[in-house]
Structure formats: structure tokens, C-alpha cells
């Protein structure tokens, strides 16, 4: 198993990316890594990894794509960027199975779609980030922002890709799939949701349990939520934002009185655990589903630990042959006319 | 000033509705109320309000519309329901200025739109509920679910209606209006958002500050968020759901260790305040904006206190002549072809 690592792009890159990949290599004996990035910065970070040396390659690609670059311009003009070089490697080298990147989201989606290519039948790749549930599990949200204007059939594709992902990476059997809606009744929602509902009911290979309201996201009732990228983005960012603002508020209130400070002192560990529990970085990156090869997008603010979690995800997805399983599930769908894009 | 009260429909109706209205009457000397509902249930609740008697009327309407009734059926067949009778009163009696109802949302929107009628130029009425911000203020979200498939021009209408509402009911000057989007850059989002952005920039009578991400909803940076009813619904319910699940988690974790329990004992008042702070019912109902007369929708689970807050809202909106101000702002918009619906 060989994974390409895009060494640049995140806030703590290249250090977090390289160190994270090394952590993952120590966990998985059969894992080789190709580091793609500025050799002058990467080589010193590899000085102390003697025992891993023969599983490591470095490809020099000193340019960096930022959030300011337009995705199409980045693909065309930044050919020596770590991201584009890594994606080209994935496209060209049959021995490289997956890519982990913290880089600019728009460029990653565009370059992956264009260069690695979509699985046959998939209209567009989609992101599937994870959130922790209050019952101690996780819930996937697909799509969370790669596709903002979608067709009903795409919700079915998100359900299939997300289900195969949760099975492969987390061993969740028959993931319970719900469609994000403004009510739980069958006929609720906008035109998109009303058209998609019967399609989801009929689709083979998924365990569709109906509509869900966003207030139930964290309850643990569902394994996978399917939605358009716009409302999925709202769903994820509202959850993060509310949790963060509440923790801030708590911290501020505690400072108001001495007895609160004493109380909080006794509960310090609990608050730390709660903060860590709500820290989405601990649950891995946002997988881009639907390309011919596995692509994992880490958070821009990833540290080495969270980058290693992303590496683990990519490793497990490859071990479980996820891409092949998505291909089979999509092929099993009733044939629909595919529109050229 | 005369407000019609729909006495039935909420979980604690008619008691909470009647008692809440009486609380509001004691706060406002010039407020008269028409209670619409089952006289046999209402009269006993009015036994102890001698000093308010001459400002009270009761209209007998014993039927109740529930969430199970299809809105159109309810309007057609439940003519003796408290909601329909109250709405007809608003339509027919020029002395009745506003309606406060806890009743079924779908029926309330449909009946208000059809019977009370829209303000000229408004495509569809929209809800504008409020959430508390961490800076101690409030933020309005328009629309939160009345309109799921919308046109760009409707986002402009939501911005105007919401701005006039926040000015009238809360004295917020030049409310800062942001459009809910998946990023803050101008060109972000789906077709709807990209078309609406320049329209919002140009529209007179609003203080449009650009796109916002849902994670900033509670920060206090914005007074009003405009969005389609689908993502607005996701925004509101995710915020509520996350806050609720975090408080539940906190409660559960506290029970794990004695020292946590002792700490929590010292912080009891703080936790109670936090819970009350996050309780959206304390911030009033969801105003339905865009009808010829003021309609306030209280939460189905309202108690007397929160019903009284809804009454206050309706009172302030009427005092400030909000409907007239919306009418003027909409009339000042560049003329667009209105499509028949």
C-alpha cells in the first residue's frame, strides 16, 4: 500500500503533514509513503526515521496552491505545486493508491475530478466529513460543500458512496442513511427532496431510513446524512460554531464568580474531555468520494495527530477496497441517462 | 391597539395562551385582546382579571387545527377553528391589528397568506425567528421554513422585511444583513446566492454587509441572516440541537465522578443561566412577515411567559407601524415583473 502525501497547504505544513504520515507508517507495517513537496523543507523532517527509510520516497514540488488561487488557474499554472504533482502521481502511477492533502479545497476537488477522474456513473465527487455523536459513535455528512446545485439522483449517489465509506473505514454494517430535511414526513421539503425520496427508497445497496431534522444530527440515530453541499455545509459549520460558542460562553461565565472558578477547577478534566470530544479534528478528515482513487482532505489546521488520523482513514479505505465497492454499487443502480457536464 | 389571540394549538393551550395574553395586557395599558377559542375553556381562565375585563372580548370557536390536518383542508373544512376564525377576524375587522398563534405552522402560513393577503410586491410571507448571540444581543433568521424553493428577489424581500422588523420590534438601527453562504467571498455559493448577491448590494433600505458562514451565526457580528427556508430551517434546528445535545452531554458527564458533582453544585446557578440563555423561547416567537397585518407564531411548547413575549413583540411591531414601513420599502425597490402564483 502506497499513499501520496501533499506536504503543503495546511496551517502547520509541512511539519504536521510529514510527522503525521510517519506516525501512521509506524502503525501500519505495509504502508509506504511518497512525500510530495519542497525537498529542502521535507528532508530535514525525515532525518530521524531510519527504520522507515526504505518505505519513503520524496518528490520535489516546491510550489504551493493557496485558497486565493482560482482552482482552474491553479491546475493550469501551478504544475509544480505539491498538490498537482501528487494528483498527477495518483493518476499515472498504478502503485500509488491514495492521496492525503490539507490543501485548498476548491483546487483539490477540481484537480481530483479532472485528473484522477470519476468512477463511472458518478456525476460529481462529494465530501463526507464526520462528526461525533452523543452516543459515542460518528455520523457522516455527504455532501458537505463540493456540490451546491444538485440533482435528485446525486443524493442517491451520496448515499451509496457514504455507505461504502462507513463500512470500509469504520466497519459500520448497513449504515442507517437519512436525508436531511425540514421535517420527518415523507412529503416534506423542496422539489429536490421530494423527488429524491422515492429514489432513495428504491435504491439497492443502501439502508435508507427516511427524512431527518438537523436537530437530530448528533443523537446517534443515523450513521449517514445525505444532503446538497449547501445545506450540508450549513449543517457542519453550524454544529461546529454552536459548540465552539457555547464553550467560549462557558469559559467567560466561569470567570464571573469565585465559586464558579472553584467548581470549574474540580471539573477541569471533564471540560477538557468535552472540548476534545467536540473537536472534529479527532475524527479524521473529509473524504472526497467518487474519484477513481481515494482522496482524503485533512483540515487546514491539522496537527500531526490529526494528519495521522487522515492517513489511517485512507489506509483502511484502501484495505477494504472501497473504490471498487462503490463502483459495483453504482453499476447496480437502474440505468439513468447521464448528462454531459 | 387590539390583538387577536388564537387560544388553541400549542402544547399548553389554552391556559398558557390566555395567561400569557393577560400578562401582556398588564404591561400595556392600551392593549385590548380578542380571545378566539372554546368559550367553555376560556371563560374560567378569565375569572380573575376584573380590572382587564373591559379590554377583553371572547369569540367562540371550538374546533382545533392540528399538525396532522393538511393546511388546505384545514382552511376549507375547519371554519370554526380558533385559527381560521382569528384570521378571518384580522381580515374583516379593521380594529384588530395583529394575531398571535401557537397553532400548526403550515395552516397558519397558508391561511394568513390567503385570507389576510400579502403586502403588494411580496412574493410570499416568510418567518423570522430570533436566536441569542454570545455578545448578549439577538440575531434574526429570515426565512426559516415558510419558503423552500425560492427566487433571488425573495432574498432581497427577506432582507427588507427582516430589517423593518428588527427596527420596529427591537430598535436595532440599520440592522446588519448578511446572506447565509458556504464562504464569505462574493462569488461563493449556488446559483441562487450568486444571483442574489448583486441584488442585495443594490437594494435600497437595507444595510447588506456580505456573505456569512453559519459558524458565525451566534457571534453577534450580524443582526439578520437571509436564506432560503430550507437552509434557514437547518441553521435554526442545528443550533438548537447542538446546544441541547451539549447540555445533555454535560449533565451526563457530571454524574460520572463525585468531584464533578461537587464542582457542578458550586456552578449550579451558572448552568441554569446558561440553559435559560440558550432557551430560544425566551426570545419570542417567529414572526410571519409579509402579510397585510402582523402575525406572530409562538413555539408549540410555549408557556404563559413565552406567549407573553410573543404578545409584546406583536405590540411593538404595531406601535412602530412595521407593516406600513415594509410596504414603503418594498415599493421603493426597482420594479420587477411579478409572476402570478
Image (cartoon, coloured by chain):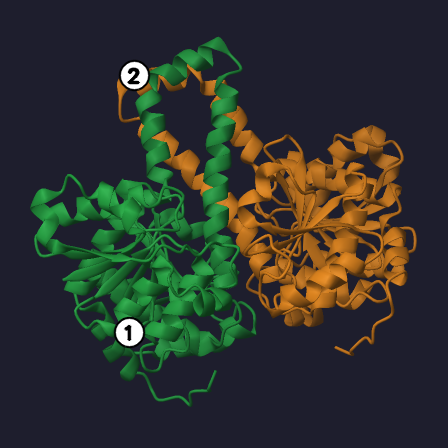
Chain colours: A orange, B green
Q: Is residue A49 left or right of residue B173?
A: right
Camera-nearest residue between A222 and A340: A222
Using the image, determine if residue B205 lies above or below residue A90.
below
Residue B191 in the image: x percent, y percent? 56, 74
What quarter of the picture does the N terminus of chain A occupy? top right
For the point 51% across and 31% down, which residue is it?
A275
User: Which of these two is toward me, B170 or A291?
Assistant: B170
**Residue with the most extreme front position:** B40
Label 1: element kind: loop
Q: Is residue A302 left or right of residue B208?
A: right
Q: What label sits on residue B292 in the rendered view? A: 1
Secondary structure at numbered mark 2:
helix
Q: Is residue A114 left or right of residue B138?
A: right
Which of the pair A302/A54 is nearer the observer? A302
Residue B288 spot, x, y in % from top left? 35, 63
Residue to which mark 2 is pinned: A259
Q: Chain of mark 1?
A: B
Look at 36% across and 60% down and name the residue there.
B83
In the displayed structure, A293 sits above or below A283; it is: below
Q: Are marks 1 and 2 on the same chain?
A: no
The chain letter for the residue carrying disc 2 is A
Amino acid at each position: 500500500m502506497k499513499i501520496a502525501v501533499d506536504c503543503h497547504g495546511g496551517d502547520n505544513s509541512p511539519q504536521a503533514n510529514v510527522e503525521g504520515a510517519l506516525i501512521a507508517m509506524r502503525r501500519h507495517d505495509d504502508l509506504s509513503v511518497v512525500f510530495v513537496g519542497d525537498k529542502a523543507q521535507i528532508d530535514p523532517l525525515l532525518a530521524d526515521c531510519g527504520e522507515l527509510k526504505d518505505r519513503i520516497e520524496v518528490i520535489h514540488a516546491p510550489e504551493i496552491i493557496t485558497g486565493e488561487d482560482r482552482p482552474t488557474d491553479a491546475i493550469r499554472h501551478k504544475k509544480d505545486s505539491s498538490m498537482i504533482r501528487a494528483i498527477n502521481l495518483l493518476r499515472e502511477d498504478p502503485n500509488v493508491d491514495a492521496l492525503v492533502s490539507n490543501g485548498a479545497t476548491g483546487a483539490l476537488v477540481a484537480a481530483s475530478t479532472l485528473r484522477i477522474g470519476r468512477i463511472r456513473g458518478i456525476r460529481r465527487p462529494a465530501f463526507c466529513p464526520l462528526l461525533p455523536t452523543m452516543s459515542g459513535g460518528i455520523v457522516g455528512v455527504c455532501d458537505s460543500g463540493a456540490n451546491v446545485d444538485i440533482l435528485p439522483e446525486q443524493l442517491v449517489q451520496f448515499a451509496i458512496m457514504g455507505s461504502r465509506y462507513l463500512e470500509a473505514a469504520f466497519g459500520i454494517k448497513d449504515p442507517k442513511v437519512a436525508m436531511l430535511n425540514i421535517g420527518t414526513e415523507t412529503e416534506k421539503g423542496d422539489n429536490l427532496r421530494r423527488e429524491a425520496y422515492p429514489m432513495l427508497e428504491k435504491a439497492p445497496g443502501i439502508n435508507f431510513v427516511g427524512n431527518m431534522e438537523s436537530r437530530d444530527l448528533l443523537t446517534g440515530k443515523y450513521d449517514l446524512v445525505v444532503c446538497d453541499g449547501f445545506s450540508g455545509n450549513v449543517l457542519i459549520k453550524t454544529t461546529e460554531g454552536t459548540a465552539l460558542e457555547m464553550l467560549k460562553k462557558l469559559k467567560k461565565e466561569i470567570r464571573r464568580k469565585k465559586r464558579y472558578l472553584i467548581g470549574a477547577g474540580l471539573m477541569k478534566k471533564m471540560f477538557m474531555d468535552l472540548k476534545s470530544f467536540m473537536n472534529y479534528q479527532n475524527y479524521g478528515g473529509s473524504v472526497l468520494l467518487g474519484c477513481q482513487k481515494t482522496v482524503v482532505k485533512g483540515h487546514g489546521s491539522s496537527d500531526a495527530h490529526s494528519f495521522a488520523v487522515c492517513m489511517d482513514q485512507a489506509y483502511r479505505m484502501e484495505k477494504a477496497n472501497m473504490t471498487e465497492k462503490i463502483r459495483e454499487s453504482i453499476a447496480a443502480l437502474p440505468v439513468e441517462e447521464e448528462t454531459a457536464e
